[in-house]
Structures are given as C-alpha cells and as structure tokens.
Amino acid sequence: MISDAGTYEDNQGMERTPKDDPSNLEPSLEINLVEEEKLRRYQDYERTRQRKIRERKQKRVRELLTSLNMLSAALFAALSVTERQISILQDIHSVVQIPTLSENLEQISPKTLDTIDEVVRERKSFIEKVRGLVENMDIRRKIV
C-alpha cells in the first residue's frame, strides 16, 4: 500500500540508466538537420557577402585605374604643351639676338631676354615636377 501519493512521483525509487539522463541523449535527427540547414545558409550568406565585397573592391580599383589613366593623359598633354612653349620661347630668344634686331634695341622692351629665360626655367621646373608625378602614378598603378 502506498502511504504517500507523492512518494513515487517522477520515477522516484526507480533505477536510472545513463541513457535516461537528458544530458546524455543525442540530438534527434530533426535537430541535426535544422542545424545543418542553418550552417549551410550561413555559409551561403558568407560566400555571397564576400563575393559582393570583392566585386566592390574590384570596381573601386578599376575606377582608380581609370582615374589614374585620365590624370596621366592630362599630365602628358600638359608636358607636351609646356615643351612646345619652351621651344617657342627659345626661338623668340634667338630671334631677339639677331643682329638686325639688336641694332634697334628701342623696339625690344627692357629685360626681354631675362624674362624669356625666367619663363623657360619655370617651364622646365614644371616639366620636372610633372615627370615626378607621373613616375609616382606609375608606381601606384603597379601597386594597384
């Protein structure tokens, strides 16, 4: 006879086996499938995210290279114009020194030759700076 109804609740008094312990139970197949599905979805998400990041980076690199190429073309055009200016200024310098013009010095403004020489020096300095810039751009283009 059972003297107390609560005495045998929760399988009290029954021998427990390690298989019965909930911490030792293996997850059901359904739980494993759900976890695998979550993992697969996360991996798909990560692959997609990495691909999009890579595509954005590639686009930025292409835009940077395009900008460098455009700047390089503009600098080469500026070099060409400046070299042509130097050539013209040197021609003017040599024309001013022609003996027939030297006889009519009043027609030549004072310090004309000095001014021409100064402009030529400035243009040559500009050319050196632009060439340095172009070299740096070439190095950066190779890095990118």
Image: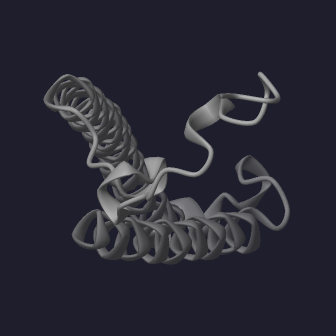
- 30 or 11: nearer the eye? 11
Colour setup of the view: one colour
Q: Residue furthest front?
A: 1
- 25 or 42: nearer the eye? 25
In this picture, residue 58 sits left or right of residue 122: left
Q: Quadrant of residue 66?
A: top left
- 101 or 92: nearer the eye? 92
Image quarter hosting the C terminus: bottom left
Q: Residue at x 49, y 50 (%)?
A: 14
Where is residue 62? Give x, y as percent: 25, 38
Q: Residue at x 37, y 42 (%)?
A: 64
Image quarter hosting the N terminus: top right
Where is residue 134? Give x, y as percent: 38, 66
Where is residue 16? Give x, y as percent: 43, 58
- 29 or 14: nearer the eye? 14
Where is residue 24? Give x, y as percent: 37, 58
Numbered disc total = 0
Q: Residue at x 29, y 27 (%)?
A: 38
Q: Residue at x 72, y 48 (%)?
A: 107
Question: Relative to 127, is 61 above or below?
Answer: above
In this picture, residue 104 sits left or right of residue 65: right
Question: Relative to 3, is 143 above or below?
Answer: below
Question: Relative to 144, is 59 above or below?
Answer: above
Q: Quadrant of residue 36?
A: top left
